[in-house]
């Protein structure tokens, strides 16, 4: 097992249970969107989303219960509901960018970005982006990896949300936050 990330992160479930707080003037912010764990609320769409996510025991290794969103993607109405929940949450919050972590963040991220009028920033594995990039290494539960982003993809004081399909140890998410150079809203 790798070491746990020492980064303050929240899932959408945790965010839904807390009051939405606006950062003070000039404060940079990032909210974390975890596609595999929909927020706990009375919204009837949540049950359909939960039902559409397949749990695969012992994947990618023994002891892991993997939440597979590919089954959700096979149901267009439920996929739309998942995107709509994120859009409803973040529309009107002054979000400038949606950063998607390779690869499943590329599924939800662009749809959310378009709907809220924000740019999409792909956070990729090494050597996948042309041109000048910045990198951030991180520890996984089974090794190390790296994320890269184009230089200048985000400007100081821009607000961003990060989209990925799950949070395991938080290492990838912490690397994304460091790469964007911003702080959490919550």
Image (cartoon, helix red, strand yellow):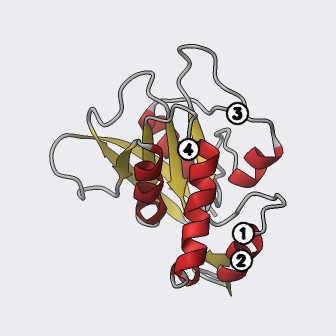
Q: In screen coordinates, is 63 left or right of 17?
A: left
Tell me the CA gap for discs 4 and 2: 30 Å
Give the vertical position of 2 relative to 24 (above or below).
Answer: below
Report the disc number at residue 45.
1
| Dot placed on the residue nearer the N-terminal end, 3 or 4 | 4
| Dot placed on the residue nearer the N-terminal end, 4 or 2 | 2
Q: Quadrant of residue 61?
A: bottom right
Please tell me which residue is depicted at 62% across the width and 50% down the height of the picture.
88
Q: In screen coordinates, is 181 left or right of 47?
A: left
| Of residues 3 and 93, the one drawn nearer to the viewer in this rendering | 93
Report the disc number at residue 174.
4
Tell me the CA gap for discs 3 and 2: 27 Å
Tell me the CA gap for discs 4 and 1: 29 Å
* Quadrant, the C terminus: top right
| Label 4 SS | helix
Report the disc number at residue 186.
3
Return the residue found at the far left.
131
Please tell me which residue is depicted at 36% across the width and 46% down the height of the picture.
121
What is the crowding at mark 2: few (fewer than 14 residues within 10 Å), some, or many (at least 20)? some
Q: Please report contact status of discs 1 and 2: CB closer than 8 Å, yes or no.
A: yes
| Of residues 31 and 83, the one drawn nearer to the viewer in this rendering | 83
Q: Please report contact status of discs 4 and 1: CB closer than 8 Å, yes or no.
A: no
Find residue 9 and report its horizontal and vertical position in percent: 66, 43
* Quadrant, the N terminus: bottom right
Q: Please report contact status of discs 4 and 2: CB closer than 8 Å, yes or no.
A: no
């Amino acid at each position: 097992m790798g070491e746990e990330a020492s980064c303050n992160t929240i899932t959408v479930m945790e965010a839904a249970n807390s009051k939405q707080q606006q950062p003070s003037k000039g404060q940079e912010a990032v909210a974390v969107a975890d596609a595999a764990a929909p927020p706990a609320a009375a919204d009837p769409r949540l049950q359909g989303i939960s039902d559409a996510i397949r749990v695969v025991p012992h994947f990618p290794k023994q002891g892991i219960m993997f939440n597979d969103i590919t089954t959700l993607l096979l149901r267009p109405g439920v996929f739309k509901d998942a995107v709509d929940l994120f859009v409803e949450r973040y529309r009107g919050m002054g979000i400038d960018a949606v950063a998607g972590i390779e690869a499943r963040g590329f599924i939800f991220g662009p749809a959310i970005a378009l709907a809220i009028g924000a740019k999409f920033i792909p956070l990729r594995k090494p050597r996948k982006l042309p041109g000048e990039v910045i990198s951030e290494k991180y520890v996984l539960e089974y090794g190390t990896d790296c994320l890269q982003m184009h230089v200048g993809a985000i400007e100081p004081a821009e607000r961003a949300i990060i989209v990925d399909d799950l949070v395991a140890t938080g290492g990838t998410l912490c690397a994304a936050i460091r790469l964007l150079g911003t702080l959490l809203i919550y």
